[in-house]
Image (cartoon, coloured by chain):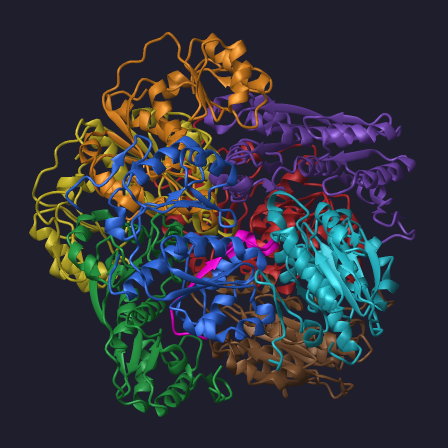
Chain colours: A blue, B brown, C cyan, D red, E purple, F green, G yellow, H orange
Amino acid sequence: MGKSKGFHDLGFAKVDTGRALRRGFPEVVYCPGKRTEHILSIAKEILRRKQDLLLTRLNEAVYGDLRRSLPGLRYNASAGLAYLRSSRKHKPVKGTVLVISAGTADIPVAEEAAATLEVTGIRVKRLYDVGVAGVHRLFGSARLLKGAAVIIVVAGMEGALSSLVSGLVACPVIAVPTSCGYGASFGGLSALLAMLNCCSPGVTVVNIDNGFGAGYFASRVLAARSGRNY
Amino acid sequence: MGKSKGFHDLGFAKVDTGRALRRGFPEVVYCPGKRTEHILSIAKEILRRKQDLLLTRLNEAVYGDLRRSLPGLRYNASAGLAYLRSSRKHKPVKGTVLVISAGTADIPVAEEAAATLEVTGIRVKRLYDVGVAGVHRLFGSARLLKGAAVIIVVAGMEGALSSLVSGLVACPVIAVPTSCGYGASFGGLSALLAMLNCCSPGVTVVNIDNGFGAGYFASRVLAARSGRNY
Amino acid sequence: MGKSKGFHDLGFAKVDTGRALRRGFPEVVYCPGKRTEHILSIAKEILRRKQDLLLTRLNEAVYGDLRRSLPGLRYNASAGLAYLRSSRKHKPVKGTVLVISAGTADIPVAEEAAATLEVTGIRVKRLYDVGVAGVHRLFGSARLLKGAAVIIVVAGMEGALSSLVSGLVACPVIAVPTSCGYGASFGGLSALLAMLNCCSPGVTVVNIDNGFGAGYFASRVLAARSGRNY
Amino acid sequence: MGKSKGFHDLGFAKVDTGRALRRGFPEVVYCPGKRTEHILSIAKEILRRKQDLLLTRLNEAVYGDLRRSLPGLRYNASAGLAYLRSSRKHKPVKGTVLVISAGTADIPVAEEAAATLEVTGIRVKRLYDVGVAGVHRLFGSARLLKGAAVIIVVAGMEGALSSLVSGLVACPVIAVPTSCGYGASFGGLSALLAMLNCCSPGVTVVNIDNGFGAGYFASRVLAARSGRNY
Amino acid sequence: MGKSKGFHDLGFAKVDTGRALRRGFPEVVYCPGKRTEHILSIAKEILRRKQDLLLTRLNEAVYGDLRRSLPGLRYNASAGLAYLRSSRKHKPVKGTVLVISAGTADIPVAEEAAATLEVTGIRVKRLYDVGVAGVHRLFGSARLLKGAAVIIVVAGMEGALSSLVSGLVACPVIAVPTSCGYGASFGGLSALLAMLNCCSPGVTVVNIDNGFGAGYFASRVLAARSGRNY
Amino acid sequence: MGKSKGFHDLGFAKVDTGRALRRGFPEVVYCPGKRTEHILSIAKEILRRKQDLLLTRLNEAVYGDLRRSLPGLRYNASAGLAYLRSSRKHKPVKGTVLVISAGTADIPVAEEAAATLEVTGIRVKRLYDVGVAGVHRLFGSARLLKGAAVIIVVAGMEGALSSLVSGLVACPVIAVPTSCGYGASFGGLSALLAMLNCCSPGVTVVNIDNGFGAGYFASRVLAARSGRNY
Amino acid sequence: MGKSKGFHDLGFAKVDTGRALRRGFPEVVYCPGKRTEHILSIAKEILRRKQDLLLTRLNEAVYGDLRRSLPGLRYNASAGLAYLRSSRKHKPVKGTVLVISAGTADIPVAEEAAATLEVTGIRVKRLYDVGVAGVHRLFGSARLLKGAAVIIVVAGMEGALSSLVSGLVACPVIAVPTSCGYGASFGGLSALLAMLNCCSPGVTVVNIDNGFGAGYFASRVLAARSGRNY
Amino acid sequence: MGKSKGFHDLGFAKVDTGRALRRGFPEVVYCPGKRTEHILSIAKEILRRKQDLLLTRLNEAVYGDLRRSLPGLRYNASAGLAYLRSSRKHKPVKGTVLVISAGTADIPVAEEAAATLEVTGIRVKRLYDVGVAGVHRLFGSARLLKGAAVIIVVAGMEGALSSLVSGLVACPVIAVPTSCGYGASFGGLSALLAMLNCCSPGVTVVNIDNGFGAGYFASRVLAARSGRNY
């Protein structure tokens, strides 16, 4: 698994320094449950190695604290995502990812997906609030659907939109269930199960509210499309 | 609660003889878990009172046994439903119920709904195999959708079809989740939750595989439409 | 699905402008998870088109903010529902909807159903706190039960009331499970399952606490009763 | 816990010989998962000590096998219960237990409860098929309800009957959920949850299909009523 | 169900005025989800009829508000229970109820059971913190166990104590699962399931944290023991 | 949505004739719950249009029946998959899919994925029985891992293998939970949840045992890689 | 992870040849879902390397088939376990494992644990049918409890026995929930949750019915006790 | 179970004074749900008997209050654990426990395990942040793995790390699922199920977030290793 040790040991954390090389994407920091000083130490180590820094599920207050020590750190409040791009240039990647949301309340998760892609230099288009309650809103965007290399569908409640979209296109569709809803949505379980039971093949699913995971996976598909795996 | 006692006591069962008058629909016999001789005694009591007989979830072997004692009993094998209509005429009911199935495997449940309605003299149209994997199959039937007084949507797996149909029409939509599927469909739970979380209002839901319940409810809506409640 | 585009694109939302025509009920705004400025923009677009405005699950503080920009917006605090009726007259609809609650704590959900109906000009009667712990309270209102064209039953805990009511009437019964209860009510799951497993046919179910959905569906049944679907 | 060892060791089983003295009821053999020869050995040990023998959940084939070695063993096929009463007389117990079933399919569980009581010399009355779909069938038996010292209510599907009965009487009500039903009854879970969430106090619950447990508990209440605990 | 109407209609509530006569226990007010002014109106109606007043799950702040209008209202803070006994004397009831808690954190639920009994004039003994982790603490109280007419066992986590106690006594055992615990206790589900699956017969179960229900049921058993049902 | 109607109506089914054009993959027939004569009619319609025929979850007996009417139909017994390739040539697709199974019992699901890909002309490599219990078996195949354009990981029980594989590669990883296991695997739920909660990004998930869905999705990724979407 | 490749590749399986050295226990074959010829090939490879062979969850018919090719293979029918010990001697291990079952129906799982230990040369004592319904049966064996180095407790239904045993001893207790029970035992879930929520520390848990896993783990504890890890 | 009474009765609690002798570990106080004055009384009783005091799940504010009355009480904020060691010396125990965490957010639970061990004088090594997303971080510590007598693996999300570690070592592995994660981790359920379904034998599991339980159990294994059970 590589000749060098491949990580930097901070005691409370072992920063995976070989990840960009091995996986085509540097280590991303999932912030919940981590202390601010821990996030800071990890972030500094990543930056010291001239890699892109991406912090997910970061709330605005902690961002404020971090920013003092990490000038240049930017924040996408809607997505809860902070990032600081290294000076290294991303190789251009062909193809556009279309991020679709079923409702307005799903937008933060959709933005997490979109921002993850944009940070790594991938072109994103957005199509928001086209849920199945008014399906003509989706059909009005047939050209957007056809032009996408990958589609990410973000939906809560009954999670029906991914089945519908998948039936219309040839490209891979990544479904993100969200916790939008109440009662028998059981925190996103309803949408999750619906998406897993999709009668229309061509759909895979990530965890509830995991916009980052969908964006990351889409970047891997596009890298594959470009004839290289990282 | 009526002046007469309102039921006939068979010991193991108390046949609700006032139900047709009270509810506009005679007592219907749900067969699972009942012994054949019990079903037979209940059926005879219903027929003795010149009421329509409807037996649900009856398997073909038991039907064979019952038929010997109940000449004229007819059987809808696809729906698992036996019936014997009384000589009394049903008052004509205005309006048509459209029964839609998402897939071919959902047809037995759809037929249970359709047969329940037809036994009571209500006009039914069928639109089968128009699931969201190929949504143009549904849109090809726009006239059928618009012409229905009530629509019953029968779907398993992700149960997305009821949301979609509901978004297209003004009439009430009754959703029937089915146990078609595998894995994370958990015996119909996935479709059930999706239908309950429908983002498009105008949908109510019955139990998994309960085609009879959907047909019965639709008959109550049409009776209301006809300006009488029974 | 219609020749015009049928929606107005606000970027973060696509207001479904054809909904009143297509479905007989204008787009209703479900507020949780939406930013106040988004709710406001959508509301203004709906009003600009001279349609009835209905905002559900709106808390009082946000209502206060909205009201400054939307003079005339009224608020039903018990139901958490704000509305502003257009000057257009509703065609009169025949028939009354009876809204029943099992307990006092179920009243907010019952009021959401009742208010949804009243906003659209439908006559509503209320029968509150008649749960099965003292069933004579229900039987004391036999006339109310018989006179209803549609009945909505709102109940938490064991959700038994819808079965009982359904056994007494011929009209359609819509059951709304509520999250009232504790322990093994699991946030309304107990009532939901009970209502779905109703041994008395003639009952359909909506999501937990979904008073709006029940009211909306009842309005669709009455529209059918009035001989038109919208 | 007593001076003697209080059990007889068969190696694979330790027959609790002090149970009748300690608990007022001899050890009862739950048969599923036990080999026939094991059941036989345990039974013989109980009989050797001149105690009443009660075997629950015994299927008819195994009963046939056991009977050859245990002449006098009787079988209640509906309840799946075999028993052989010792020659010792039961002290008379005051009061009657009323066993109520919601439907015909719940009778086997109701019979398990009733037979458990009758084997120990307690008077039982039965009231079957009085579920909430036709509630007048229950009200027609008001005298039976009032005359009972304890009531056992056996119901599947939505399990509403125990709430209703409890609201009418002053005596303790023991609720037995059954696995009768399909779909969202989830093997009796629906009835179980409903009974646990009973809005009418005075109800306690046993495991799904546990007619024996309800009968046993009722016998303990009556023993208390008779002024002794065993 | 009786000749008089049997309830008093407050609009938002229908106070069940016949309950003491019918059930041997006046209507008890479950407070969560009810507005303070509603609780007050119901309480006044109960007091006007000279019945005992019992308010459950009442928090201390609301109690403070109520007390101003209801002088004499007393409060058991540990149990979250307020009460005001009428001047009518309770007929003496024979027998003692033993309330057992597994741990110290289960005491509030145990106190709810104990206080419910004491308000109605029933003698209660307490045996707290005798969980299975140190079973000798239970065996040190064998005399208390033997002397009880009914035992209530309150336990969270694995809920094992009810099985153990039941194996030692002849009297009825009522098990109350509590939500004490974390992780895989899933809010009391673990204890609830364990108690329902009790291998030792003689146990019935109430809802999670439902100390009141257990106390109420125990009072019904003792009333039965006293040869009258109310 | 295409100019032609786009489907062929068989009454019980509507064959989606435009799917190959629209989605790059012809309609695939999921066989469970369908009658043999229905499968046959659908198959004939697909073949009549000179499209590839793929039948999933077909048992061997039904295959035997179908084969008489469909000469040339081939069967992969391990995968439960029948197919008949049209004479049209598939355009060559660049890239290999690596199908990995954790255990020997997962092979049928892995074969369903592999066969789905091979039928459509995509190169597949297999790496079976490399679960985490002996992780060196996976590391011995580092070259295979690096050379894949897409990886499908099939695993039951704890479903840990997809996380591990994903951490080693840059290409997209599709995880297929299987129902292999017992007890707390709850029919594949354990593996499903584990895969959804993957701490290593780059993984998406399909339904339990859905080898076909994983294969289909991988073919969509490779089609994208080849610079066309169908 | 070792210099040699460490496994033997059979194509459908990769036999982990280094496991005995690495883990102190050779690869054990879990049979469900594996074809008989696959089991045979794996078994032969293990024997060829002069390692102990252990096959779990093997039914008697398959054992019969295997035995023809594997003379000397022995079978423990109660445990569903086949084994063939190599001629190599096990180093003696100090300490006895006590295997306790709550009921008679739990014996097959208990035997799987016991047999797993005995095959590897570890001394086992058995104490069966000492469940909490008659707790004196356990206390009668205090010496056995004190003398054990490790205790395995096997119990279904409410799974209370592990808490009780753990409270009495100082040694590690391994709890095995079983699927014995019905209704709300939900296939062993009830016992599993109870054991995980054990209020008495010193207990860890394995999967439902996983007697093998408990035996294996106990052998690892004893190896540790003997001052070596394999 | 011993001649003396073995506990000290405080009314609200019965302090188990014989526990250190019986179990080799004094009573440990689980603080949630207990009042501060109750914790204090129990603590004083333990200290009065010159035993080690260990308080788990204690928040910092309550610690502050307790400390005033219990000088010398120390607090591990990361683990939420307070302790006060008696002057008695612990007998030295051979062997080291290795505590591994998958991520940084799992550290508090890992610290609870480590601190529990250290308080009782057992040597602990820590290996944090070596989750499967970068598995080389684990392999870089092969010597640590080999040198441990017992390993505790703490992981949330997919809980895969325990399977992986177990496959590499011969010593017993105790798995602690944590509630780290979101969405379909369902509060730690995902990790719990994964660990229970471990395909690699040699793993047992404790409750979600139960670091204390894992530490306690490990101390019991080492006590066994040291040739004594307490």
* Residue at x 50%, y 68% (from the top left corner): B179
Asked where in the image residue F96 lies, by quadrant, the reply is bottom left
Residue E98 in sight: yes
The answer to whether residue E115 is above or below residue G41 is above
B104 or B63: nearer the viewer: B104
Asked where in the image residue H224 lies, by quadrant, the reply is top left
Q: Residue A184 lies in magenta, yes or no?
A: yes
The answer to whether residue H36 is above or below residue B191 is above
* Residue at x 83%, y 44% (from the top left corner): E19
Residue D147 location, x and y as percent? 78, 48
Q: Residue F137 lies in magenta, yes or no?
A: no
Placement of the C terminus of chain E among the 4 image quadrants: top right
C33 or H35: nearer the viewer: C33
Residue F38 location, x and y as percent? 43, 85
- Magenta residues (range): A168-189
Residue D212 location, x and y as percent? 57, 49
Horizontal relation, residue A168 to residue C208: left or right: left
The answer to whether residue A82 is above or below residue D191 is above
